[in-house]
Image: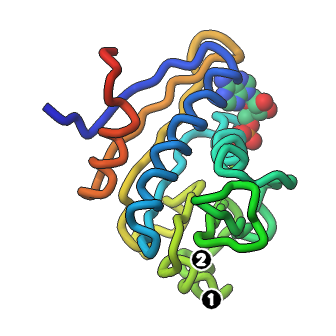
Amino acid sequence: MAQDSYKQHCRQEADTAGFAKKLAASLRDFFLLHPRAHLNISLEGELGAGKTTFARYLIQALGFSGRVKSPTYTLCEPYPLNMSNPDDSKNPNIVANHFDLYRMRDPLEWQEAGFAENFDEAGFCLVEWPDKAAGTLPPFDITIQLSSVSDENAREISISAISQDGVNILESLFSGENE
Ligand code: ADP
Ligand code: MG
């Protein structure tokens, strides 16, 4: 039976990178089938949990070769990506919008800053600190929670599907695994 929630234990940062790479492969398959789709993915967890680190590995695994900086001061950093040919970033067919809402003082600041349309374009939004927008964001398809565990470099990643698209992506992500 399809599950809509999984936990991944990462003993070190390389495991987090590996998991981001697997999610990237599932997202690529999804966008090859649904090139005009839009997905919303939350990244939750304490400061230092690894949200930005995970986003960076994910965006790079999808073919972005430049620097993925933290969007703390800009609220959002967009990354044009090409799903059929990762090396062809000059002809993007989706955009990954990486948000960090930590510094927002008002839940609607992201709309006032002109980012509402980023939630409609083909591609996906990855949102750190969604709670700062207190119920003003469109619904999430997938939520990802990172938490620190015993070891300094270990993290637990919980990933849950909210929408049917999310369920399908998680199914492809974990198919063939028996953990
Ligand atoms: P956040 O965005 O959640 O505040 P960052 O990604 O900015 O967190 O910082 C996480 C820090 O933890 C980085 O310095 C990263 O190198 C480190 N780190 C150590 N182990 C891991 C791991 N297993 N997964 C992710 N980050 C890790
Ligand atoms: Mg961060």
**Which residue is tagged 2?**
106
Residue 114 in sight in this render:
yes
Counting from the top left corner in percent of width and height, residue 119 is at 50, 77
Query: Where residue 112 is drawn, which disc sits there?
Result: 1
Q: Quadrant of residue 108?
A: bottom right
At a point 30% along the width and 39% down the height, the residue shown is 171
At a point 54% along the width and 48% down the height, the residue shown is 43
- The kind of residue tagged 2 is Asp
* Left or right relative to 176: residue 112: right
Which image quarter is the C terminus in?
top left
* Left or right relative to 71: residue 126: left
At a point 61% along the width and 78% down the height, the residue shown is 110
Whether tag 1 and tag 2 are in contact, CB under 8 A, the answer is yes
**Between 46 and 175, the one nearer to me in the picture:** 175
Q: How many marks?
A: 2
Query: Where residue 43 is drawn, which disc sits there?
Result: none
Closer to the observer: label 1 or label 2? 1
Counting from the top left corner in percent of width and height, residue 24 is at 55, 45
Identify the element where label 2 is drawn.
Answer: loop
Identify the element where label 1 is drawn.
Answer: helix
Residue 22 lies, with reference to residue 136, above or below; the image says above
How packed is label 2: few (under 14 Cα within 10 Å), some, or many (20 or more)? few
How packed is label 1: few (under 14 Cα within 10 Å), some, or many (20 or more)? few
**Between 45 and 87, the one nearer to me in the picture:** 87
Residue 122 lies, with reference to residue 47, above or below; the image says below
Counting from the top left corner in percent of width and height, residue 14 is at 70, 22
